[in-house]
Image: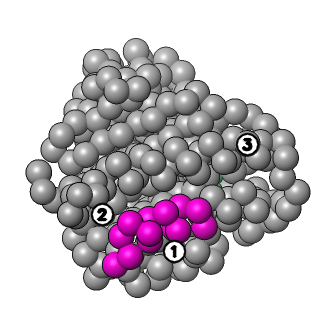
């Protein structure tokens, strides 16, 4: 499929190589960084490692594909308006790399070993390559549009649970304590009794990679950004799962409230969120 290469350079190879290099560097900085800054609130952190990783990723991508656009979390001012604007600014790009240099900054800061690098390549609005790398487990999750998704070189397949009560699912506790968090908590409150259990491990990209790998049957979170989800969404789609917003509309880059499952529990999970009035931030 020629859409994945320019000349002899494979998009996927560059994504993998870039995520791996950034991930190894982040891991080398675990417990060894000194600038901790607060972004939006005390729940929203950034370090020089987030920024350094993004710089490294931008440089590597630009070296290979100087005409491609890049949207990275640390290049955008915090807050929903700035992210919406940043996405608008790149909406005309033929090729757009959507990058979360370090997903799980709070975990990284505390030495809780669950974080990732997430890199997606979007072609005319559609994700065609998705890579999520967890340096601690040395696990690389890779998907190419129409070609399947792999972890450690093995084809991934979503879980086979068909009932919520048999399902292990995950969510996040968003840093936006006034807007997204209470909505997410309503969902959590409603779902806890209905599912086997819920995990809140602190990296949306890895939660989604775990849905793709069949380790979780579902994931939802209110108020995410394009860079948290773009790679994970393709991983799940290419593993046979379903990705929509919490209202059931198809996934696209603008989605903030995501519902990602093995497909089989999608309807039931969505219905519970609707019943709990937990699908969106009230305007
Ligand atoms: C965060 C993580 C976390 C999720 C937050 C995200 P960051 O990303 O994915 O799990 O709950 O909503 O913002 O800031 O660590 O890249
Ligand atoms: Ca962040
Ligand atoms: Ca993130
Ligand atoms: Ca991040």
Instruction: Please state the horizontal and vertical placement of residue 176, each as a whole percent of the image.
Output: 66, 61
Residue corresponding to mark 3: 28
Residue corresponding to mark 1: 83
Q: Is residue 206 left or right of residue 160?
A: right
Instruction: Please state the horizontal and vertical placement of residue 203, each as a whole percent of the image.
Output: 58, 43
Instruction: Calculate the distance from the C-alpha at mark 1 to the C-alpha at mark 2.
Output: 17 Å
Q: Does the stretch in magenta take in 61? A: yes
> Are the residues flagged by discs 3 and 1 in contact, CB closer than 8 Å?
no
Residue positioned 32% across, 31% down in the render: 150
Disc 3 residue lies near ligand 4 with CB under 8 A? no
Vertical side of 146 occupied by 101: above or below = below
Which of 60 and 117 lies nearest the eye of the viewer? Answer: 60
Residue corresponding to mark 2: 122
Please, what is the dominant secondary structure of the magenta stretch? helix
Instruction: Please state the horizontal and vertical placement of residue 191, each as a whole percent of the image.
Output: 49, 31
Q: Earlier in the sequence, mark 2 or mark 3?
A: 3
Q: Is residue 267 visible?
A: no
Residue positioned 44% across, 31% down in the render: 210
3 vs 1, front mark: 3
Residue positioned 76% across, 62% down in the render: 48
- Crowding at dot 2, Cα within 10 Å, few <14 / some 14-19 / many 20+, comes out as many
- Is label 3 in a helix, a strand or a loop? helix
1 vs 2, front mark: 2
Q: Is residue 206 left or right of residue 111?
A: left
Going by the picture, which residue comes out furthest to the front?
Answer: 8
What residue range appears in magenta?
54-67
Q: Is residue 32 visible?
A: yes
- Crowding at dot 3, Cα within 10 Å, few <14 / some 14-19 / many 20+, comes out as few
- Is label 2 in a helix, a strand or a loop? strand
Which of 14 and 131 lies nearest the eye of the viewer? Answer: 14
Q: Earlier in the sequence, mark 1 or mark 2?
A: 1
């Amino acid at each position: 499929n020629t859409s994945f290469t320019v000349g002899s350079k494979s998009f996927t190879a560059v994504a993998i190589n870039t995520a791996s290099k950034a991930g190894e560097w982040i891991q080398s900085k675990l417990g060894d960084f000194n600038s901790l800054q607060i972004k939006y609130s005390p729940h929203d952190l950034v370090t020089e490692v987030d920024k350094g990783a993004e710089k490294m990723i931008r440089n590597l991508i630009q070296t290979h594909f100087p005409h491609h656009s890049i949207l990275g979390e640390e290049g955008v001012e915090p807050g929903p308006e700035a992210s919406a604007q940043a996405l608008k600014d790149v909406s005309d790009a033929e090729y757009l790399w959507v990058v979360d240099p370090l997903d799980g900054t709070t975990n990284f800061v505390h030495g809780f070993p669950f974080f990732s690098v997430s890199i997606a390549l979007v072609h005319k609005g559609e994700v065609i390559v998705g890579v999520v790398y967890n340096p601690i487990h040395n696990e690389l999750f890779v998907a190419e549009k129409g070609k399947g998704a792999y972890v450690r070189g093995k084809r991934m397949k979503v879980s086979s649970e068909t009932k919520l009560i048999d399902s292990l699912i995950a969510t996040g506790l968003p840093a936006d304590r006034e807007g997204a968090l209470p909505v997410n908590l309503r969902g959590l409150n409603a779902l806890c009794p209905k599912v086997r259990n819920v995990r809140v491990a602190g990296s949306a990209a890895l939660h989604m990679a775990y849905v793709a790998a069949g380790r979780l049957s579902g994931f939802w979170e209110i108020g995410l950004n394009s860079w948290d989800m773009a790679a994970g969404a393709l991983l799940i789609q290419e593993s046979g799962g379903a990705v929509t917003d919490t209202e059931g509309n198809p996934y696209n880059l603008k989605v903030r409230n995501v519902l990602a499952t093995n497909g089989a529990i999608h309807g039931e999970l969505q219905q519970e969120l609707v019943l709990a009035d937990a699908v969106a931030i009230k305007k």
